[in-house]
Image (cartoon, grey):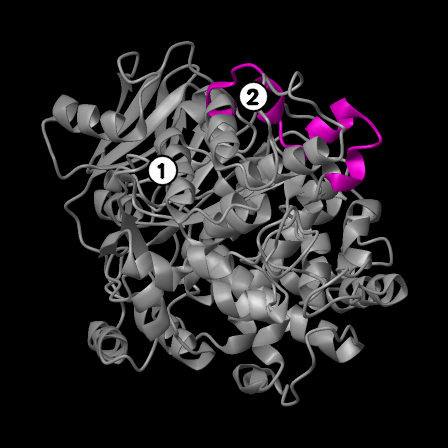
Amino acid sequence: MPYGYVGKVLRVNLTDRCISVEEPDDDWYRKYMGGSAVVAYYLLKEVPEDCDPLGPKNKLIFATGALTGTPLAGSGRNSVGAKSPLTGGFGDAQGGGFWMTELKKAGFDHIIVEGQSDEPVYLFIDDQDVKIRDASHLWGKDTAEVEELIREDVGDDKVRVTQCGIGGENLVRYACVVNDLTHFPGRTGMGAVMGSKKLRAVAVRGSGDIEVADRDKMMEYSRMMNQAVNSGERSAGLKDTGTAGGVVNLKTSGGLPTRNFQEGDFEGAEKISGQTMRDTILVDRENCYACPVYCKRVVASEEYDVDPTYGGPEYETIGSLGSNCGIDDLEAIAKGNEMCNRWGLDTISCGMTISFVMECFERGILSEEDLDGISANFGNADAMLQLVEKIARREGVGQLLAEGAARVAEEIGPEAQPLALHVKGQEVPMHEPRLKQALGVGYSVSPTGADHCHNMHDTAYAKSADSLNIYGITDPLPPSDLSDAKVRMLYYDSNWKHLQNCAVMCQFVAWSTRELIEISRAVTGWDTRLYELLKVGERACTMARIFNLRAGFDDRDDELNTRYFRGHEKGPIAGLGIDRKEFNKARLTYYRIMGWDDLGRPTPARLAELGIDWAKELL
């Protein structure tokens, strides 16, 4: 058994109720590590290319990583993956919390769920005793009620629960998975896959230990980071104001998405900032397993009856339900966040779909009659809240909006399609590619559709490239630069983030690259180096690329909405659009650095170099 892992993969077939356990060898663990790579491996090996994402042939994979469950800040995370019902391609999302640690302590690194149940069920894993239990009494209930009922069922208030909400039950294509009520593997519609299998939840109780190679070294790093965070030396801003602490700075730089990305400097930014949240509706801070940062917000509001049980809004939600919908009412945004969390919706895709509808309404493409009598102007907080509920329940116009912005635009017609901001069918997150232009290239080539978590944020390297010095990159570059040198940055930065999604490790904890290498050695006992770990990330990205190619995607899907090739009409970056020729050249350079041909297909030679020769026959 390799250190850092328990060495077992649980396989559950919900059609025939067969439960089995597999034990991959040490080399497999070292090559794929966990998280996104494990998801890509099983999807490529086992999911047919013509599989219906909401059908019985799709597989839902819960994957931990080498560092999951160790007492290291940032280790409380897992991946959830399947063929995406939103994009039709590779689906993968990461979330934090405590559930994933409980799974490893119960004796499993990963779970593969296959088939479909005819009736609602949930899994109960009590150490290595696994049961499929009736969930008919859970169906249709809010996430907090489901967690409470499961704990009553099993007679243990310490059990950890991951679940889909009613959004997943209703097959909203961007329904998310909910860990421990307030942590969300949010993107690509994994909650809908869970709902399609009639799997309402996975409850886990574990009593085992996770063996590591060098516990003294690991604890030395753990204490160091805890002291650095508690002293304010690292991650101080995240602890104080959460991920929304940068809202005002983004407005100042022109990078705060406003009114469906028509602008970048929302006039109400100060009202919805992390600082304002801290000073008004914040009632507590929460963390993930073993993490001293406590970046999670807990909020309450009497005006909108916001239940603190469901935590509080992150930056992405502040942007998607706030500035991008033209809404500056923080308490209304907090209520929208609570509703999404209560019912299991990805706040990014939900908010982007609503902002798209608002622009269609203001341009006269949609009317109140089309929207069940809702006057969906930008800035109308009540309209936003009404649409969130209709989407979760698939009621009225929510039946259409639950399909995601790309499908809604196709249904409405050509006038609406340029207003639906997505890549490969997944709505764009709250980061402006006109400000961060390599990020825009990263959006276009992302295997999951537009994603900011395995992507480069150009502004981080505008003044210093110190964190990239380990790759021999020393010179900072402007955020709007799309030179070959910038694409080289994108290659290293994004593949390292793919690695973090395999480890699985939080990117908000300020570990340096060198520290993560040393941590990996201490936990696993492998004599690993930067090169090997970087290749884990690249391997994961390449396998996901092959999955998409098999699903029918090609280089023409590596595209951005035309809006991003035009500048804002006003504001700090007025007139700054992405140059089409530079974008196309940068995308081609990225293909070539990744070892893909000019149509974005991984070459047999690169697959050999990555040690995944078995994937050649899939191209």
Q: Can you say which quadrant of the picture contains the C terminus?
A: top right
- Spatial distance from mark 1 to mark 2, Cα to Cα? 18 Å
Look at the numbered disc 1 and give the secondary structure of its residue: helix
Q: Residue furthest left?
A: 155
Per the image, the residue denoted by label 2 is: 398
Looking at the figure, which quarter contains the N terminus?
bottom left
The amino acid type of the residue labelled 2 equals Gly
Q: Residue furthest bottom?
A: 474
Q: Is residue 292 visible?
A: yes
Q: Please give the residue where the numbered disc 1 appears in the rendered image.
A: 338
Residue at 79 percent across and 45 percent down: it is 557
* Mark nearer the N terminus (1 vs 2): 1
- Residue 395, percent across and down? 52, 15
The amino acid marked with disc number 1 is: Glu
Q: Relative to 117, is 433 on the left or the right? A: right
The reply to whether the magenta stretch includes residue 542 is no
Q: Main secondary structure of the magenta part?
A: helix
Residue 512 in the image, given as x and y percentages of width and height: 43, 78
Based on the displayed image, in which of its 4 quarters is residue 443 positioned? bottom right
Magenta span of residues: 391-419
Tell me: 226 left or right of 575: left
Name the residue rendered at 42%, 76% in the picture.
517
